[in-house]
Image (cartoon, rainbow, N blue to C red):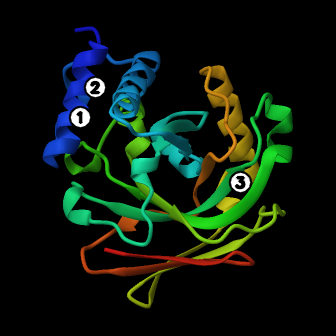
Amino acid sequence: MSADVHALATTLEAAVRDRRAIPKLTDGADLDIASAYAVQREVIERRTRSGERLAGVKMGFTSRAKMIQMGVDDVIWGLLTDAMLAEGSVDVSGLIHPRIEPEIVYLIGREVRSVAEVESCVAGVAVGYEVLDSRYEDFKFTLPDVIADNASAARFGFGAWHAPRDLSNAGLLMEIDGRPVQTGSSAAILGDPARSLRAAARLALGAGTPLEPGWIVLAGAATAAVPLPAGAHVRITGAGLASVEVTT
């Protein structure tokens, strides 16, 4: 059957509220990419109507390997709200099956009116993290499913801001309870996270949502995401960007 945007948004809302994994939406709906983004936007608009504020965008499938795995040739994106910002701690008991990954984060200093100018609009860069929490059973989904689910966005955080700089090959280390669990380079993000930043501007402008001053862009994962357990201390360090920490 065809996609009922409002009904599918309600299904995803209920999964978040009840902390309950659900079957893929595509198991019962004819969900294409355009409809999936419509579901995503409906969910976010409900959140903003309830008082949350848009805080930026997140990029997904910024790894070439992930693109090949999913059979796509472009990145996807989702929207962030202020309620997703984790200031030092994340209550994982409120999530279904959380995972965490290291990120390069951009701070937008002025409205982005074109893709060509987006890099000149960056006011700062930081090392950060994203907590993913797919609402689907077994963390398995198709491309339309993950888009509708706001690209699995759940929580995010970042460290101190630094002056904009070349981040095409910045080393990143993620530790949990003092033990290294992932190491990588920002080059894993489309070869250079600046490419992901430009893609964020392209997709946002195309959707009529220009990047605004004060918003952030999560450029994408530099390593694979790992499960985030309760009672953990996570530190993510970026070369030249210091570190950010979060507890659960």
Nearest to viewer (mark 1 / mark 3): 1
> Residue 9: which numbered mark, if any?
2
- Left or right, residue 248 beside residue 128: left
The quadrant holding residue 147 is: top left
Nearest to viewer (mark 2 / mark 3): 2
Q: Residue at x 32, y 80 (%)?
A: 232
> Residue 193: which numbered mark, if any?
3
Amino acid marked by disc 2 = Ala
Say if 136 sits above or below 222 in the image.
above
Residue under pointer 1: 13
What secondary structure is marked by label 2?
Answer: helix
The quadrant holding residue 144 is: top left
Say if 172 sits above or below 115 in the image.
below
* Residue 63 showing in the rendered view: yes
Q: Nearer the viewer, residue 138 or 21?
A: 21
Q: Residue at x 24, y 74 (%)?
A: 230
- Left or right, residue 27 beside residue 114: left
Mark 1 touches mark 3? (CB < 8 Å): no
Which quadrant, please, contains the C terminus?
A: bottom left
Relative image position of residue 51 (x, y in whole percent): 37, 36
Relative image position of residue 3 (x, y in whole percent): 29, 13
Pick whichever of labels 2 and 3 is earlier in the sequence: 2
What secondary structure is marked by label 3?
Answer: helix
Say if 95 sits above or below 77 in the image.
below
Question: CA gap, disc 1 to disc 2?
Answer: 6 Å
Say if 81 sits above or below 41 in the image.
below
Pick whichever of labels 1 and 3 is earlier in the sequence: 1
